[in-house]
Image: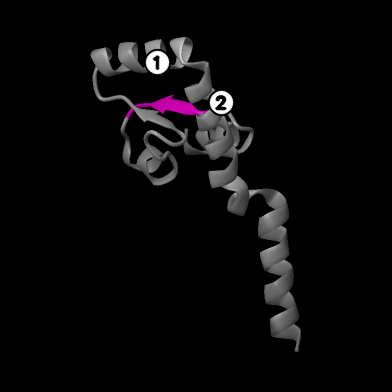
Amino acid sequence: SLFKIGVFLAEGVPALASPVPSYREVLIPERTGLLCDSLRDWEEALDRVREDRELLRRWSAEAHEAMRPYLTEAVARRYAELFRELAS
């Protein structure tokens, strides 16, 4: 689900996923993971992640960073700012 992929990315776990529209919204191909259209795509993606630890490390860092604006703390900060503006 979109929620699960978002949680994994926020924790720095890159995603390999089918190219459904909701996943396309959150997963950045070659930066936070890969979208896999076919069985061959899945095989190649799994081989890449298994064989290239630097790629996995880089995607992990990018995944966490890409989700930073959606973390609870960031969202709470934006709500607090909005409430302050509305109260003034």
Tell me the residue that label 1 is attached to. 48
Q: What element carries label 2?
A: helix
Tell me the residue that label 2 is attached to. 57
Q: Where is residue 50 in the image (x, y as percent from the top left)?
A: 47, 11
Q: Residue furthest bottom?
A: 88
Image side of residue 28 versus residue 81, left or right? left
Q: Where is residue 16 in the image (x, y as percent from the top left)?
A: 42, 24
Question: Observer-nearest residue: 55 or 2?
Answer: 55
Count of numbered badges drawn on the protein? 2
Q: What element carries label 1?
A: helix
Question: Observer-nearest residue: 28 or 1?
Answer: 28
Magenta residues?
Answer: 14-18
Image side of residue 85 versus residue 22, left or right? right
Q: Position of residue 88 (x, y in %)?
A: 75, 89
Q: Who's the residue at 40% across and 40% down the image? A: 28
Question: Observer-nearest residue: 73 or 53?
Answer: 53
Label 1 is placed on what type of residue? Arg
| Badge 1: residue crowd in 10 Å (few <14, some 14–19, many ≥20) | few
